[in-house]
Image (spheres, helix red, strand yellow):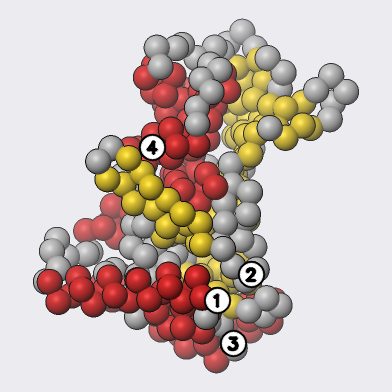
Amino acid sequence: MSPLRITVPASSANIGPGFDSVGVAVSCFLILDVSEQDRWEIRHKSSHLPTFAEYTDHFIYQIARRTAEYHNKELPACKVLVTSEIPLARGFGSSASAALAGIELANQLCDLNLSDSQKLKYGTEIEGHPDNIAPALFGGLMVTAVSHDDQVEYISVPGPELDLIAYIPETELKTEEARRILPENYSRGQAARASSVGNLMIASLLQGDYQLAGRMIELDSFHEPYRAPYIPNYQIIRREASQLGAYGSAISGAGPTMVSFAPKGYGPRIAKHMTTLLPEYKVMPIKIDSKGLQVERVNLQNTIVAE
């Protein structure tokens, strides 16, 4: 096996009313550099990764083994160097990116020839919903997906480039904790209003009306009103970003990171102002990733060839 590199982007999910169904791929990456050797070895090259004792305890290995076993295959030994730019427990889909990396690792090591639909299905089964898996796999502005009857349907919403600004606090918020904050049930009226807002958000994106889309993002009633008290500076970020020209701001995933969507070219100016306003945050403009999951192989001339 020639050495290979697996690259998976981070993702920002929910995007206001797109609860558990809408996400966008962003330009922070999880990278696996894989080479053949006679025993398993996994090494971390980044601080944005959890500790582990043995390779068998590693989440990516466990997902790869599970995927291989599902196809009655055994993973061959290899060396995996893991690099990550994705902060943990901050709302950027780090677990979804790792799950997708594990699925693709098995796909490559065992020659499974998995289709994109299979990768999406396996990832959704692991994550429980497709809003992080789908954008990480396909890339794009807004990827809308739904899981039903053992299938996962998806579509990418096209559109011009936008600037994204991420506000990443030092505090963590585990997805499990953020889920417990939400109500178990919604009334028919609550559900109808929330889904109407989500429908209008998608329709306005398709029409290219980003001002309206931004307003709908900030009218979510599925999860943001319940999580907002646990998100530091939630109202300040929404208000200040709007005054600086952002279309709208939303909790990224389960939080505590927030993301603003702004016209192209506005990102650096908004980030500069917000860095001054929120010195305890890591504030940065980020790009939408249009490629999604990528696999590259090193040929005999030591050049990288994308698959």
- How packed mark 3 is, by other alpha carbons closer than 10 Å (few <14, some 14-19, many 20 or more), is some
Q: Could you tell me how far apart the alpha carbons at marks 1 and 2 are, in whole angstroms? A: 8 Å
Q: Could you tell me how far apart the alpha carbons at marks 3 and 4 are, in whole angstroms? A: 38 Å
Three-letter amino acid code at the position of disc 3: Gly
Locate residue 193 relative to residue 95 in the image: left or right.
left
Q: Which residue is mark 2?
A: 160
Q: Which residue is mark 3?
A: 245
Q: Could you tell me how far apart the alpha carbons at marks 2 and 4 are, in whole angstroms? A: 28 Å
The numbered mark, 2 or 3, whose residue comes first in the sequence reads: 2
Q: Is residue 199 above or below residue 41?
A: below
Q: Which mark is residue 121?
A: 4
Q: Which residue is mark 1?
A: 208
Front residue of 171/99: it is 99
Three-letter amino acid code at the position of disc 4: Lys
Quarter holding residue 270? bottom right
Query: Picture coordinates of residue 153 (x, y %)?
Result: 38, 47
Q: Are marks 3 and 4 in contact (CB under 8 Å)?
A: no
Q: Could you tell me how far apart the alpha carbons at marks 4 and 1 are, in whole angstroms? A: 30 Å
Q: Is residue 84 above or below residue 274?
A: above
The numbered mark, 4 or 1, whose residue comes first in the sequence reads: 4
